[in-house]
Image (cartoon, helix red, strand yellow):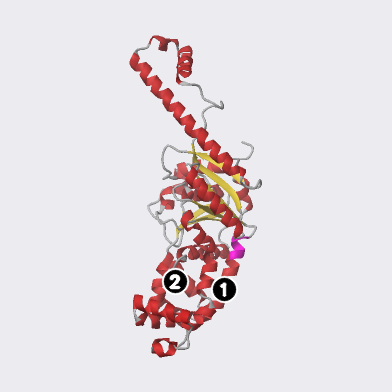
């Protein structure tokens, strides 16, 4: 199986999955393969571990993205017909750019950017990083500079934050609640709140207890400055959802063969379907291939007899050599047991997937992928020609 056709048929690929399964490496490999095939490819990560730069043989990546030089790629044995760019999302910079782009006037943008409540919000709002990743994805898509964009996402524990980020931001900016926070008399004192609902009064009291009355004025100023952006942000959210669920976008699940990861993956795939963002591909990473094709491996004595038959000189070998051979045989049998267990779990997981989902298995590598040459090998496994 291969993801070659999936990659060729889509302009946006979003990689989702648990942490520690090679998701960032897979995203970089897909983008690299796109460049090899002649695409103008861009990969974007929000992985705080900054693994993407390492996978491309670089020390670091800027938030604006940078094109990987042809010299770096060719030094790794890659000769792309297209281009490859990569970037690491910086949450604060992305928020500032978002405000600057969508504010009705430069003065409104300066007011918001200088507001202390905004500065705190842009760093710590739940789902803030995820929303900015989607916003950056949308911006890159609309720029027309790339015909393939691959997005790496947070681990599964935060992946639903990513998928639901547009709705959460709209809920946060709900006018029925925000209306109370844009009133210019908010900072005048508690007498103004006698007409407010009990829920609103409770909310503001808790805010004041936590941060002081000055914060209330900052909140009011922030929402007053943001008021002209609300309609634009709501419309932007609709466009983002349309982009994520559109025919040009493919979600690819990166998973591993162990039981816990597959359990998290099953939950994620079901939630994605509920959100109208169905899965189109699965990369089963770090798989241990089953040695041979026998359903049950031979026992140690049988293997030892086979070795003696193949190499008669072993029959008269000393006890130390026999002990080493027995250790090798036991290791082989243990690896076979692990591989068979993985195969059973993989088959059960894949049986629950729709028939039209492309799947591919990538074997466990001897070492982590930290250079272009190794990344190219992963790309070749993920996107091998379908008739290979």
Quote the CA–CA distance across marks 1 and 2.
Answer: 18 Å
The answer to whether residue 104 is visible is no
The overriding secondary structure of the stretch rendered in magenta is helix
Q: Quadrant of residue 313?
A: top left
Q: Position of residue 259 (x, y in %)?
A: 49, 43
Q: Quadrant of residue 385?
A: top right
Work out whether residue 235 or residue 11 is closer to the camera in this orientation and state it. Answer: 235
Q: Which residue is mark 2?
A: 96
Residue at 46% x, 70% y: name it.
97
Quadrant location, the N terminus: top right
Determine the residue located farthest toward the front in the rendered image: 198
Residue at 48% x, 14% y: name it.
310
Quadrant location, the C terminus: top right
Q: Which residues are magenta?
A: 241-245
Q: Position of residue 384 (x, y in %)?
A: 58, 40
Q: Which residue is mark 1?
A: 234
Total marks shown come to: 2
Q: Is residue 266 left or right of residue 9?
A: left
In the rendered image, the vertical position of residue 128 relative to residue 349, given as above or below: below
> Is residue 242 in the magenta section?
yes
Work out whether residue 178 or residue 98 is closer to the camera in this orientation and state it. Answer: 178
Closer to the camera: disc 1 or disc 2?
A: 1
Q: Dot 2, crowdedness within 10 Å: few (<14), some or many (≥20)?
A: some
């Amino acid at each position: 199986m291969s993801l070659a056709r999936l990659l060729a048929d889509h302009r946006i690929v979003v990689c989702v999955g648990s942490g520690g399964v090679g998701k960032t490496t897979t995203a970089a490999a897909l983008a690299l393969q796109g460049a090899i095939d002649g695409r103008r490819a861009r990969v974007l990560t929000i992985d705080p571990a900054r693994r993407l730069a390492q996978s491309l043989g670089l020390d670091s990546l800027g938030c604006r993205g940078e094109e990987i030089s042809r010299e770096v790629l060719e030094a790794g044995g890659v000769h792309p017909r297209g281009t490859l760019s990569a970037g690491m999302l910086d949450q604060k910079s992305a928020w500032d750019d978002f405000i600057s782009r969508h504010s009705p006037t430069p003065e409104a943008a300066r007011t918001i950017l200088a507001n202390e409540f905004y500065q705190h919000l842009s760093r710590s709002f739940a789902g803030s990083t995820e929303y900015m990743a989607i916003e950056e994805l949308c911006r890159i898509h609309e720029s027309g500079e790339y015909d393939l964009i691959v997005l790496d996402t947070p681990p599964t524990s935060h992946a639903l934050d990513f998928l639901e980020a547009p709705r959460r931001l709209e809920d946060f900016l709900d006018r029925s609640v925000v209306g109370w926070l844009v009133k210019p008399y908010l900072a005048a004192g508690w007498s103004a709140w006698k007409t407010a609902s009990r829920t609103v009064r409770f909310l503001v009291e808790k805010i004041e207890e936590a941060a002081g009355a000055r914060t209330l004025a900052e909140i009011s100023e922030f929402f007053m400055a943001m008021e002209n952006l609300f309609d634009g942000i709501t419309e932007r959210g609709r466009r983002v959802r349309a982009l994520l669920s559109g025919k040009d976008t493919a979600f690819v699940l990166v998973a591993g063969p162990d039981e816990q990861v597959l359990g998290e993956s099953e939950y994620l795939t079901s939630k994605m379907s509920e959100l109208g963002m169905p899965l189109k591909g699965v990369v089963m990473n770090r798989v241990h291939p089953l040695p041979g094709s026998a359903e049950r491996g031979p026992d140690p004595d049988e293997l030892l007899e086979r070795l003696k038959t193949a190499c008669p000189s072993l029959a008269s070998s000393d006890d130390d050599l026999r002990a080493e051979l027995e250790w090798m045989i036991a290791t082989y049998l243990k690896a076979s047991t692990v591989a068979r267990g993985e195969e059973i779990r993989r088959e059960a997981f894949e049986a629950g997937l729709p028939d039209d989902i492309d799947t591919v298995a990538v074997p466990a590598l001897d070492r982590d992928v930290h250079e272009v040459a190794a990344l190219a090998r992963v790309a070749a496994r993920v996107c091998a020609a379908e008739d290979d």
